[in-house]
Amino acid sequence: MKTLQHIVVAAVALSATGCATVPGHQGGFQGAINDTFNNPDPCSNNARNAGVLIGGIAGTFLGAKVGDKDKGAMLAGALLGGTIGGLIGADIDDRRCAMAKVAQEYQLQMQFAAIKNDGAVISDGELQRARNAGDIKKNSIGNIVSLQDQAGNGGHFQSNSAVLTERAERYFSAIADIYNLNKAAEAAATPADRERLRQAGLKRKLLLVGHTDDTGSSALNATLSEQRARAVAEYLERRGIPRDQMYYQGAGEVYPVADNRAESGRLRNRRVEIVELADQASMGKYLEARRPNYQFYRTVPAAAPAAALAQGPAQGSAGSAGPAKQAAARAPKRAQVAKATPPAKPAAERAVAAARTPAKDAARTVPRATAPAPKVTGAALDFGGVPLTQQVSAAPAGLGKLERERPLFSLISSAYADDDMAVLSDCSQDRPRSAGGVKALKDGSTYRVNEHVPGLYGKTWTERVNGHQIVINKVAVLASEATLTQVPEFKVYANYDPGKNRNPAPNVSLRPAVNTYLGETGILYRIFAEGAGGMQCVDIVYSRGGSRSATGGNIVYARNSQLFVSPFKPVIAN
């Protein structure tokens, strides 16, 4: 035990000259420990020191086993283990310090995070406060660097394109040199160290992820962010990073880290992330553990009730663009008043308020300029539901609490801290959200890390509602993030009577957009019907454990310019 204590003290003493002094420095032995293993300065030697300590401990035990507890063997083992651990840690420290210098030189907003051994991510700020920071660092399987460039400096890319600005080429060239394995190995002190770094580097994976805010078209955001992520990956390849080690993803608006209602939040959401992972297995762990921050998803304006429509024609009458598209078109205008706009109330609160408010006053609570009429295409179908304002909540049962990450690099505002998202309260307040898959740069193939949810691998689900047979074909969802793997077929057979017509033509036939949300017990599968047959959207909650019957669901549809909701729980078709 004394030998172990000597190793700790030696590691602290060894690193003391390499640690920067930062504001709030804590004196004494505890302060020395913090400076040695948990220093917030990106150019400190945290990882190296942790490597020395852990390597030394491992070497001590190995020396004790081989040398039958001989003190000389234990000391030799400690020195050897500490040297190897220190070299590995120093490689991480050097890269982080170099990245911080690039950020300072080019005035970039740069944030760091560690990927824990279970794939979960922890920001540097959280890591500094963690009591087990040393354990997290020694067992980490990767790091994330988030790059945000101020628009006033020209941004990473030329406007509305995937072409890097000249300034961005300069700093991405510097970043490429930091990740260049051959250059890192050349700087090593001995041939053995150089070979060890090269071998470790051969296993390393780099994932480039492009992110946007939620203004404009979600599909276009996803496409452009993918083009930009690929452009960065290809630029890094030209600067010496092996092509077969790189992946890219256009995540669009799906992984926000800040409140999209404020311009400052939207700015933080427009970013490029470089995710460095130790090997292929680490990449799988990270992707399976990753979760969107649903609490930052912004709602679209709720459709106007009949009382409001009676005051005059609202924007978006039948036959015009649907609520989601109109909301996207109005996004820049909404951005100007985002700071003054309170969070949308859940459906339960809106229902109670509507029940207590006279129709004349209710009309004034929904401004015509921001509350489009529900879209209806074709003959409106009646699914036997009740007015949405009479429903306590249109949120389907069986989902449980949402699985979501604590957002990195930002604080959750009190408006989001405990409440479920307003977009979950009823699907008419949501819009389709698009994100591309993780793709290999070498061949463009999509990276898959897990299996489908039982029962959600191409099956057909169906139920009859008020005489109308609803059929959803090709329902396919992956387990970890509830990722959609194919677009379903959505069909409705009005007043279906198999005794009269066994092969009728569907009254509604769509290949709809779908959002998926991962809860503790269920997966919310949200279909956007865009007004076909009067249907605005359809929610289905599937069990994560697999079942032949959905655990909950609703259809939100329009009749006579008013929204109704009807329960919907399909089963697997025989």
Image: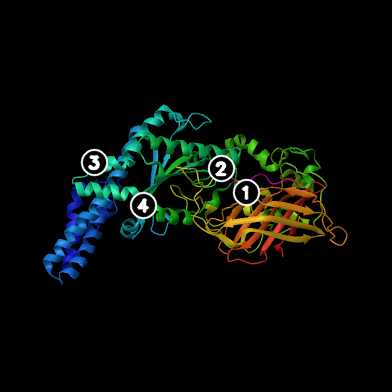
User: Which label belongs to residue 261?
Assistant: 2
Q: Residue furthest right?
A: 500
Mark closer to the observer (1, 4): 4
Quarter of the image for residue 348 reads: bottom right
SS class of the residue under badge 4? Answer: loop
Which circle's residue, 1 or 3, is located before the other in the chain?
3
Say which quarter of the image contains residue 219.
top right
Type of residue at label 1?
A: Ala
* Residue at the disc numbered 3: 186
For the point 21% across and 59% down, the residue is 81
Q: Is residue 534 left or right of residue 86?
A: right
- Residue 248 picture location, percent across and down: 47, 43
Q: Are marks 4 and 2 in contact (CB under 8 Å)?
A: no
Of helix, strand and loop, which mostly describes the magenta segment?
loop
Q: Residues within 10 Å of mark 2 (few under 14, many from 20)?
A: many
Residue contact at pointers 1 and 2, CB within 8 angstroms: no
Q: Position of residue 378 (x, y in %)?
A: 81, 45
Looking at the rendering, the stretch of residues picked out in magenta corresponds to 298-304
Label of residue 106 in the image: none
Q: Quadrant of the C terminus?
A: bottom right
Quadrant including the N terminus: bottom left
Q: Which mark is residue 344?
A: 1
> Is 299 inside the magenta-drawn segment?
yes
- The amino acid beneath tag 4 is Ala
